[in-house]
Image (cartoon, rainbow, N blue to C red):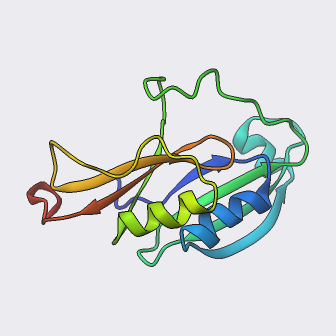
Amino acid sequence: MVSKYRHVGVIVTDMEKSIEFYCDLLGHKKLVDFTEKGNYFSSLIGLDNAEARVVKAGTSDGTFVELIQFTTHEAIPPATTKFNAIGCNHVCFTVDDIESLYDRMSGRGVKFVTRPLKSDFDPVKTCFCYDPDGTLVQFVEITEPIEWEQN
């Protein structure tokens, strides 16, 4: 049985740009920055002689984003970046003020799919942007308590 959500792993092509996005723009705290390599790592991920720079950037609730930049293997672009592609498709963060976040990030050149929109389903405002490598990132501002999230 799963006890709690831990992290999401994101393959990146430029660690410094990704740190700027996730830490400087989104306020994650860089927890660790190290090189992962060796038999354990290669066996774990199924890539021979793999080496990668790994940065874990966390939020105050203990969850974190694991940014991974390979130094031995080329990053493979996804077949599509369309929202309806099968598999893990986006990372989502709860925010306090989505309009300010949107203004600040778009002012820094971050590409958004749309401005924040009021949901027809939940009492939230939400929008999507792209991180430096095109990974979809969603932001949600809860505007009223959500009954099913209270459990």
Res. 140 in view: yes
Counting from the top left corner in percent of width and height, residue 125 is at 27, 55
Q: Residue 73 at x, y = what percent?
A: 87, 38
| Placement of the C terminus among the 4 image quadrants | bottom left
Depth order, front residue of 127/44:
127
Residue 141 appears in which quarter of the rendering?
bottom left
* Between 121 and 71, the one nearer to me in the picture: 121
The answer to whether one can see residue 1 in this image is no
Residue 20 point in image, percent of width and height: 69, 66
- Residue located 59% across and 23% down the image: 80
In screen coordinates, is 28 left or right of 139?
right
- Residue in view at x 71 percent, y 40 percent: 45
Residue 4, by quadrant, is bottom left
Which residue is at a point 68% across and 43% down the rendered structure image?
Answer: 133
Residue placed furthest toward the left:
147
**Residue 11, percent from left and from top:** 69, 45
Residue 37 located left or right of residue 24: right
* Residue located at (60% from left, 50% from top): 9
